């Protein structure tokens, strides 16, 4: 019986290969019992096969009901013009917003070195007996409306290096000494036989230059609160986790942390721990909350402590306002203007080609072929 049930499938395949259309003439030569059984099975199989064929055919032949626009020259030219007319105003608005941002950028790493150490900068920065204090004079180029953001900028500093990025423990930042699996923090995992909190190269290399501003003989207050992300303050740094055995080794990497202040309140550390993707980056130092008029003079008393001379890095102090689009960045504006201009150029080119060499359109109804009739 199992052979009889499979036989109609075998017969159907053979008949399809031989292109035999009159299947009833062959089935009539069988015995009555076998023919009746085979005929019923063949009808069931054929019905299932036809149903499957009709449902799959439209998908495999990409003949399902769908919107199939015909890209005539008019449509193509209209689409290019639309994209151009949308992108160019966005680019102009973004460019105006970027140009409205006022920035003061001052590179001080080369100017804050005594003349006698200009040829040996590494020796200067590593000698703790030499004062690292430096004074810089900044002139406000135009009116700067508060808030004015104070950044430090580092160049040629690869915070995205794989070994550097991995040298940290996010669980230890949250749980402190309760979390002991800090193997990922090597080589700054332990010091003098004791665990380090926070461990790892990222925390160890914390930026430690400081800035103090004087405006019209009055010290200008820099607000250093709320400079880190809210999610970092509330969820990534423990409120009962305190620095322990930090920067107590023979090799000091950067700033030290107050062991009496929990990590959830040390926002300069939070800002630094968000590693940058590019070798040139800015990190927020604080916020000045008063307006500055054009041509006013700012005196900056800074401590040039951070060692960028060993790897040829650069340090800059940046004061910047903001616009509705953020800081000063022309990339979005240039990209939108370039795309919009290119689209309008292509639209005009297609117009000229269409006017010079017009083509007669065919009947679009012939683009859809009814191939089902070939299998009827």
Image (cartoon, rainbow, N blue to C red):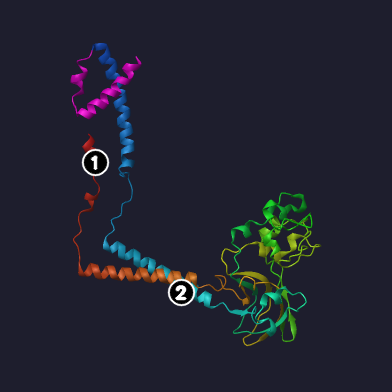
Where 177 sits versus 278, above or below?
above
The C terminus is located in which quarter?
A: top left
Compared across the picture, whether 292 is left or right of 353 comes to right
What residue lies at 62% left-to-right and 58% top-to-bottom?
A: 163
Q: Is residue 140 magenta?
A: no
The kind of secondary structure element at disc 2 is helix
The kind of secondary structure element at disc 1 is helix
Where 126 sits versus 258, above or below?
below
Residue 232, image x, y percentages = 68, 59
Disc 2 to disc 1, C-alpha distance: 52 Å
The N terminus is located in which quarter?
A: top left
Q: Which residue is mark 1?
A: 371
User: Which stretch appears magenta?
Assistant: 1-30
Report the predominant secondary structure element of the magenta stretch: helix
Where 361 sits versus 315, above or below?
above
Q: Is residue 299 visible?
A: no
């Amino acid at each position: 019986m199992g052979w009889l049930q499979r036989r109609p499938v075998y017969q159907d395949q053979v008949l399809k290969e031989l292109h035999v259309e009159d299947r009833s003439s062959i089935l009539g030569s069988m015995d009555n019992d076998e023919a009746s059984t085979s005929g019923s099975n063949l009808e069931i199989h054929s019905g299932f096969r036809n149903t499957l064929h009709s449902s799959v055919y439209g998908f495999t032949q990409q003949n399902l009901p769908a919107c199939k626009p015909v890209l005539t020259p008019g449509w193509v030219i209209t689409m290019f013009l639309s994209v151009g007319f949308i992108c160019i105003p966005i680019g102009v608005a973004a460019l105006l917003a970027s140009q409205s941002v006022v920035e003061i950028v001052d590179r001080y790493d080369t100017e804050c070195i005594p003349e006698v150490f200009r040829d040996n900068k590494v020796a200067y920065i590593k000698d703790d007996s030499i004062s690292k204090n430096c004074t810089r004079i900044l002139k406000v180029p135009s009116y700067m409306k508060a808030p004015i953001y104070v950044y430090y900028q580092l160049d040629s500093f690869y915070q995205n290096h794989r070994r550097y990025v991995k040298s940290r423990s996010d669980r230890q930042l949250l749980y402190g000494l309760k979390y002991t699996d800090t193997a990922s923090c090597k080589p700054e995992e332990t010091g003098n036989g004791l665990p380090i909190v926070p461990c790892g190269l990222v925390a160890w290399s914390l930026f430690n230059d400081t800035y103090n501003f004087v405006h019209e003989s009055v010290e200008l207050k820099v607000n250093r609160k709320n400079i880190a992300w809210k999610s970092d303050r509330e969820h990534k740094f423990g409120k009962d986790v305190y620095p322990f055995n930090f920067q107590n080794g023979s090799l000091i990497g950067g700033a030290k942390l107050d062991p009496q202040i929990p990590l959830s309140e040390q926002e300069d550390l939070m800002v630094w721990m968000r590693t940058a993707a590019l070798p040139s980056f800015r990190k927020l130092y604080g916020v000045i909350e008063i307006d500055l008029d054009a041509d006013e003079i700012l005196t900056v008393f800074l401590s040039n402590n951070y060692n960028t001379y060993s790897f040829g890095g650069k340090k800059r102090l940046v004061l910047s306002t903001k616009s509705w689009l953020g800081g000063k960045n022309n990339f979005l504006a240039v990209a939108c203007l370039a795309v919009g201009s290119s689209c309008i150029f292509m639209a005009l080119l297609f117009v000229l080609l269409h006017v010079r060499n017009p083509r007669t359109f065919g009947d679009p109804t012939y683009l859809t072929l009814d191939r089902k009739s070939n299998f009827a």
